[in-house]
C-alpha cells in the first residue's frame, strides 16, 4: 500500500509512521513563545533565590537548564505543539530570558543594598548633626549605577573561580556566555528527544498510550509475529504498549520491550496497518479473557 499524506484511509492503512514533527499552528505558537519566555523569567527568579544556598560551579547552570527543560516539555505536551523550529526558538527564548533575568535580578539586589547603605549613612549623619550642629555638610552619595554600568563594573571586578583562580574582563564575559550555553544544553537535553515523539498531523495531538501492560513471553511472541517484529528472546514477562493519537486517525504504534537473560533491555516497535492493529487487539482481548 502506498503512503499518502492526503488520503486519510491510506495513512490509516499504511504501516509507516506519521510524518515527524507538526505544522505551525499560529495560536499555539504564540502561546508557546509567551509561555516559554515566562518560564525563563520564573527560572531566573528561582535560580536567584536558590544560588544563595547552593550553586556548584558548572553544575548549577546545567540544573537550571534541566528545570527549564522539564517545564517546557510539560508545556509542549499540554499545548500539543510539535512545530520543530518553533520549539527550538521557544527553548532559546526561554534560556535567554533566564540568563539575562539572572543578571538583571542580581543587579536589582545590588542596587537595593547600595540604596540601603546610603539611607543608613544619611540617618547616622542626621543623628550626629543633632548632637554636633557644627558638623560640615554631608558629601552627596555616589549615584546608584544603571544596569549596563553594573555589568561593566562586574567585568572589571572579576569573578572568583575554584582552585584560587579568578576571571577578569573578557574572561568574565566568556564565562557568562559559557554559563548560558550550559543552561541551553540542560534544556535541550530534555526538549530535543521529546521533539521526536510521534505526533498526528490530522488531529494535531501527540500520541499517547491507549493500551499497555505486562504479558507472558508466549503472548509477546504472538504479537511480535503479527507485527513482523523480532520475537523477544526471554522467559520473563515482557511489556507492550499501543500508542495512538487522540482521534485514532494515524497509524497505531506497537512497542515491545523485554529484559534478555544477559540483563540487557530491548525495545522494538512497529507501525500497524488497520488489519494488523485489529489482529493485535483481538489477540490481546482473547488472552486477557482466558487469563481471567
Ligand atoms: Zn490523529
Image (cartoon, rainbow, N blue to C red):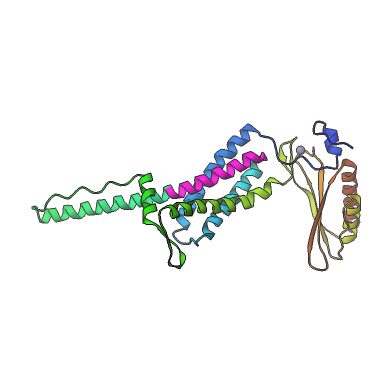
User: Do we see residue 292 in this rendering?
Assistant: no
Instruction: Tell me which segment is drawn in magenta.
Output: 82-103
Residue 11 percent across, percent down from the top left: 83, 36
Q: Tell me the quarter of the image containing the N terminus.
A: top right
- Residue at 54%, 51% in the rendered image: 181
Residue 138 in view here: yes
The image shows a total of numbered marks equal to 0
Q: Main secondary structure of the magenta part?
A: helix
Determine the residue located farthest toward the top in the rendered image: 6
| Rendered location of residue 144, percent (x, y) | 30, 47
Question: x, y (%) of residue 49?
Answer: 45, 55
Asked whether residue 20 is drawn in magenta, I would say no
Question: Is 238 located above or below residue 26 in the figure?
Answer: below
On screen, residue 175 versus residue 184, left or right, reads: left
Picture residue at 84% right of the left edge, 38% below the top: 12
Asked whether 276 or 144 is in front, the reply is: 144
117 sits to left or right of 7: left
Q: Residue furthest front?
A: 170
Quadrant observed for ligand 1 in the rendered image: top right
Q: In the image, 103: left or right of 5?
A: left
* Quarter of the rendering occupied by the C terminus: bottom right
Amino acid at each position: 500500500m502506498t503512503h499518502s499524506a492526503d488520503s486519510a484511509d491510506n495513512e490509516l492503512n499504511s504501516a509507516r509512521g506519521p510524518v515527524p514533527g507538526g505544522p505551525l499552528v499560529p495560536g499555539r505558537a504564540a502561546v508557546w513563545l509567551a509561555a516559554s519566555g515566562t518560564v525563563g523569567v520564573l527560572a531566573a527568579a528561582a535560580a536567584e533565590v536558590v544560588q544563595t544556598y547552593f550553586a556548584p560551579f558548572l553544575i548549577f547552570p546545567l540544573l537550571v537548564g534541566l528545570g527549564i527543560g522539564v517545564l517546557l516539555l510539560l508545556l509542549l505536551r499540554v499545548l500539543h505543539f510539535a512545530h520543530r523550529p518553533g520549539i527550538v526558538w521557544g527553548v532559546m527564548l526561554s534560556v535567554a530570558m533566564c540568563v539575562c533575568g539572572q543578571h538583571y535580578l542580581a543587579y536589582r539586589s545590588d542596587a537595593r543594598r547600595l540604596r540601603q547603605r546610603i539611607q543608613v549613612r544619611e540617618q547616622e549623619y542626621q543623628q550626629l548633626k543633632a548632637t554636633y550642629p557644627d558638623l560640615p555638610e554631608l558629601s552627596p552619595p555616589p549615584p546608584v549605577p544603571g544596569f549596563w554600568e553594573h555589568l561593566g563594573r562586574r567585568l572589571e571586578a572579576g569573578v572568583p573561580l575554584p582552585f584560587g583562580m579568578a576571571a577578569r574582563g573578557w574572561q568574565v564575559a566568556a564565562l557568562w556566555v559559557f554559563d548560558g550555553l550550559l543552561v541551553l544544553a540542560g534544556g535541550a537535553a530534555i526538549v530535543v528527544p521529546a521533539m521526536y515523539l510521534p505526533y498526528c498531523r490530522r488531529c494535531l495531538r501527540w500520541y499517547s498510550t491507549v493500551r499497555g501492560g505486562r504479558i507472558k513471553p508466549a503472548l509477546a511472541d504472538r504479537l511480535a509475529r503479527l507485527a513482523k517484529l523480532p520475537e523477544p528472546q526471554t522467559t520473563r514477562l515482557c511489556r507492550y504498549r499501543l500508542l495512538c493519537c487522540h482521534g485514532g486517525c494515524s497509524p497505531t504504534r506497537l512497542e515491545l520491550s523485554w529484559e534478555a537473560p544477559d540483563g540487557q533491555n530491548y525495545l522494538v516497535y512497529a507501525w500497524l496497518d488497520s488489519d494488523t492493529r485489529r489482529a493485535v487487539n483481538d489477540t490481546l482481548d482473547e488472552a486477557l479473557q482466558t487469563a481471567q
